Each structure stands twice: as C-alpha cells, then as structure tokens.
Amino acid sequence: MAVCYCRFLIAKCYIQWLATAENSAVFHRMLHRKIDSLHELFAIQFDNILQQIPEKKCLAKTLFTRIIKHNGSLTLDELREALSDEITQVAISQGQGRDLSDGELIEIVKSCCKGFVCVSERESPMRRIRFTHSSIAEFLTAAGQVPVSFSSAAPVKLAT
C-alpha cells in the first residue's frame, strides 16, 4: 500500500510541477524528462525556485521557513505580517503597488513557490497557505534549505 501511495504522490506532484511551465516548449521539455522519485522531483522544482529573480527567491525561501515554523500553514494575515518587506519587493518588481488584494497576494506566493505551496479554498481572512504535501517540509529541512530548529534569539538565514 505504501508503494502505491508513493507512486500516486509522485504523479500528483509531477502534474503540479508541469502546471508551472511558462510556455508550451518548456512544458514539452518537462513532460519528456523521466522522474524516478519524489525527492528528485522536489530537487528539480527547488532548483527552479532558486533560478528566479532575487526578490522572488527570497520570498519563497522565507515563506517556506515561516510555514514550517508555524506548524505547517499561515493565514493570509500572518503572511502579510511576517513577510511584508519581501512581498512589497516582489510586488514592486512586478509593477504592482504596495497594497495587494488577497488574490494578488496569492498569485505572487504561487508564482514564487512554483507548486510547493497551495492555498485553502475558504474565503478571507481564514484562507491558509500550506505545503502541497508534508514531504516538501521534510525535503527542505533534510536538504538544509530551512533550519530544523528555530531560535527566537537569532534571525533565520537561508543558504543561497
């Protein structure tokens, strides 16, 4: 049963990864790439996150850390409070203003995190941002991309 579940999870994550393609040429390249494990798929997707403009990369990595720190999810209000500087930088780089609607905020988060996070369907302000699967948090901590333990005395620094 565990092997079957893992295969379905790989398929689900693979489809989510394909959905991040910017155009049909990229989609076809991604479609023909053979992926053997969930870890490999996460590594490819994380590499895509690191290739973004610095503002988006910073927002994604900080968001991943905050989601883990807040036991797996954040409300939109918690997101705005915790990441206001990073969100503003991305919004400005995309030609948007400082005051974003919930929809604009969600689109920025989704574009930065490339399929690693999803947003609950409930309406504001209780909509929650979380990892698409708990194994993503495990991958990020095992890969050393987010700290395993958090200290309130020191700010969180992530490797670039």
Image: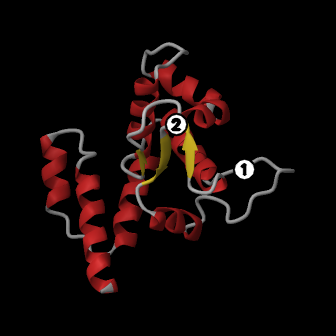
In this rendering, the answer to whether 22 lies above or below 89 is below
Q: To which quarter of the image does residue 46 belong? A: bottom left
What amino acid type is highlighted by mark number 1?
Answer: Val
Direction from residue 30 to residue 150 in the image, left or right: right
In this rendering, the answer to whether 148 lies above or below 23 is below
Camera-side residue: 52 or 119? 119
Q: How many marks?
A: 2
Going by the picture, which residue comes out furthest to the right?
Answer: 153
Camera-side residue: 57 or 115? 115
Pointer 2 residue:
126
Pointer 1 residue:
156
Q: Position of residue 158 (x, y in %)?
A: 64, 52
* Number of residues whose C-alpha sits closer than 10 Å to that of mark 1, classed few (under 14), some (14–19) or many (20 or more): some
Direction from residue 107 to residue 28 in the image, left or right: left
Nearer the observer: mark 2 or 1; the answer is: 2
Camera-side residue: 150 or 49? 150
What amino acid type is highlighted by mark number 2?
Answer: Met
Direction from residue 113 to residue 34 in the image, left or right: left
Residue at horizontal 46%, vertical 25%?
Answer: 102
Give the alpha-carbon distance from disc 2 to disc 1, as whole Å: 26 Å
Instruction: Work out whether mark 2 precedes mark 1 in sequence or the reverse, and give the earlier one.
Output: 2
Q: Position of residue 119 (x, y in %)?
A: 42, 43
